[in-house]
Amino acid sequence: MTQQSPVFDEAATAACVPVALYAFPARAWKRDEYAALQDALPALAVVSEPGCEAAWAGDSVEAMADRYAQAIASREAAKERPIALFGWSVGALVALEVARLLRDRLFDIAWVGVVDIAAYPQMRAALAGAPALDAAERAPLDAALQQWLARSAMRGLWQATLDGMARPQHDMFLREVVRGFGAALPVDGPAASSQEHTLWSRVNCLRLGIAHGASDEASAPVHWWMSQEMAASPGARTEGVKVIAGSDHMGVLADRALHAAVQRELEAVETEARDAGVRI
């Protein structure tokens, strides 16, 4: 599958703001995840890959970050302004990785803002410690999986996602999805609003996050924000996290408290640069 170049969705004024702000969706094609935040922060440029579902099914955080870092570097090379990066869910892992890559190219990364990163290290540890399915248990689940895929209009997307899973995660998929849903496994895809497409995008987000073994730290200041729902989940990070009260995972990007917090951090970069006598 040929990968297209990233697209930058931004207001006309974003190109000349003193601090660049780039955001990365959890689902690489779905730039409207940031619609509310972009309304509140016109400086925000969303980096996405419209129509890339098939490529995303077999993609990796590292590969996405490399494409995005190259594209941002080309845009920012002559501007010499601080860059802030932002991501939600798996998009936060991408933001952290892009920060590392741009820092290696000597760009000024003011900060990275991350929202609702799941507890992927704990998930990897749990998978590593889980017993493998034995042949007698695996055979009927594999048969049920193949019967479901034969009826699914999304077979290609599912197969690419499954092919990208290590054996422990594939076993988890058989246990929790194939066995868990049973006869209720959805086959109403591929429309984005369908139950099947929603399930696939969630499973692929988990695949991406679990497969990405890099630390969730960055060589730049990190601002950790978390919805109240995610903060209450087992294994959630607590150190340095600012909880957005009353918010849930799917609604936190539309929360005005988050918008205000991001705006404050952008203004802090501008103020610090002015106080230091730096022209931005």
Image: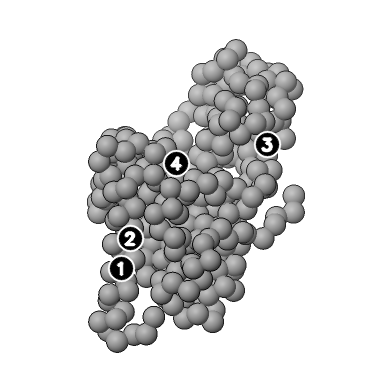
Of mark 4 and mark 1, the one earlier in the sequence is: 4
Which amino acid does the dot numbered 1 rest on?
Glu
Nearer the camera: disc 4 or disc 1: 1
Q: Dot 4 corresponds to which residue?
A: 124
* Residue carrying label 1: 267
Residue 9, image x and y in percent? 56, 58
N-terminal-most mark, 4 or 3: 4
Q: Residue at x 50, y 24 (%)?
A: 176
Sort mark 4 into few (<14), some (14-19) or many (20+) by Cα contacts within 10 Å: some
- Residue 157 is labelled as 3
Residue 28 shows in the view? yes
Asked if the residue under mark 1 is in contact with the one under mark 2, i.e. CB atoms within 8 Å, the reply is yes
Q: Earlier in the sequence, mark 1 or mark 3?
A: 3
Q: Residues within 10 Å of mark 1 (few under 14, many from 20)?
A: few
Label 3: element kind: helix
Measure the alpha-carbon separation of dots 2 and 3: 37 Å
Q: Amino acid at mark 4?
A: Arg
Q: Is the residue 205 above or below the residue 139 in the image?
A: below
Residue at 54% from the left image edge and 24% from the top image edge: 177
